[in-house]
Image (cartoon, rainbow, N blue to C red):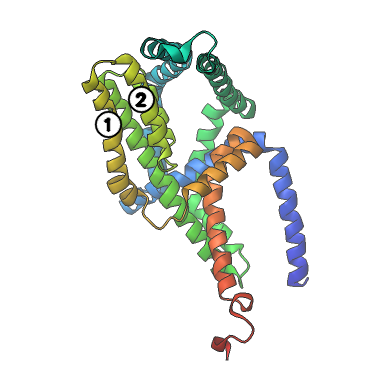
Amino acid sequence: MKARNQMRYWGIAAAVFVAVLWLLGHVLMPFILGGAIAYFIDPAADRLERAGLSRVAATALITVAGVLIFVALSLSVIPALINQMIDLVEIAPQLLRDLQDFISRRFPSLLDQNSNLRMILTSLGETIKSQSITVLSGVVGSAMSLVNIGIILVIVPVVSVYMLLDWDRMIARLDELLPRDHAPLIRSLAGEIDATLASFVRGMGMVCLILGTYYAVALMLVGLQFGLAVGFIAGLVTFIPYLGAMIGGILAVGLALFQFWGDWWSIGLVAAIFMFGQVVEGNFLTPMLVGSSVGLHPIWLILALAVFGTMFGFVGMLVAVPVAAALGVVARFAIRQYMEGSLYLGESNPEDE
């Protein structure tokens, strides 16, 4: 069979495969999550192998460490975080009522009974409460509809352990299946995608973890109520530049204004915590852990999150960043090919003579 006909049949097979993934996404999700975990942990296993451990010993060591960390978080941090998130959602309307009372005392003309500002603040408080509960329940509900908690706790770890154990053999086998004429190009693109994912996802994951921990600990030491929840939120969205600090800073300073009103020293400390975090993140953490050659613009990330979140919901938001990174690599390759071709250079380009 000629290569052109083979490409046609392989294209049809790829389309059928994508359709099957679409239809069985809720069934395959534990395996996708397990594969993603194995991919991100594989460099640690490789380092342990270079240190002298076998692949089995390295996988066993990583598994035991992961179980211990999960148990420690489940017993200490996660329950407190969930309680603070629920309390924060519940108290949001009260905070807006306090803001309304403050404005009415300082600027009574702005908040008479029939003023637009009063009605806006009242409706905003109820909207925040109802929508926050809806979003939280929707996230939990969508996750639970995809895979129940038992599958997450059983299948995902098992799949990740087995895939981590066989990761190098799977990659070698895939390399053997590449078409020989195009194998160097495919390896080059795959290597660039892997480097981008490693630099951005792994790097920004560490940045988010470090900053989220710093914000949570620092805010709790200052005495800010909901400090753990605010730090978690700020760290979670740090991978979108400036957005994490802006959301976390506004939320933390707003809570500090209500909690410490009149104690300007404490309010200033809360603001200084986020200013210091941004200085450290911009000048040290991101350059050291992520690097400057990733090529993922903030607008590209926001667009990917919006599109994939709209199309695939909660699962789409999970895969938006890796897919955006891969598409960015392919787009840069296509632009390089275009700028080296006759469509861009022209048929009479002197370099071709």
Say above or below: 187 vs 265.
below
Type of the residue with mark 1: Ile
Residue at image position (59%, 71%) is 338
Which quadrant is the C terminus positioned in? bottom right
Q: Earlier in the sequence, mark 1 or mark 2?
A: 2
**Residue 260: % across, % down:** 28, 16
Type of the residue with mark 2: Ala
**Residue 142: % across, % down:** 61, 27
Q: Residues within 10 Å of mark 2 (few under 14, many from 20)?
A: many
Q: Residues within 10 Å of mark 1 (few under 14, many from 20)?
A: some
Distance from the alpha carbon under mark 1 to that under mark 2:
10 Å
Label at residue 109: none
Is residue 314 visible in the rendered image? The answer is yes
- Kind of element beneath mark 1: helix
- Kind of element beneath mark 2: helix
Residue at image position (47%, 52%) is 296
Residue placed most toward the observer, 351 or 25:
351
Say above or below: 209 vs 333.
above
**Residue 231: % across, % down:** 36, 28
Is residue 67 visible in the rendered image? The answer is no
Say above or below: 130 vs 62.
above
Q: Is residue 274 left or right of residue 42?
A: left
**Residue 111: % across, % down:** 47, 12
Q: Quadrant of residue 242?
A: top left
Q: Quadrant of residue 239?
A: top left
Please give the residue where the numbered disc 1 appears in the rendered image. Answer: 273
Please give the residue where the numbered disc 2 appears in the rendered image. Answer: 252
Q: Quadrant of residue 237?
A: top left
- Seen as rendered, the residue at the extreme bottom is 353
Residue at image position (44%, 13%) is 109
Q: Are marks 1 and 2 in contact (CB under 8 Å)?
A: yes
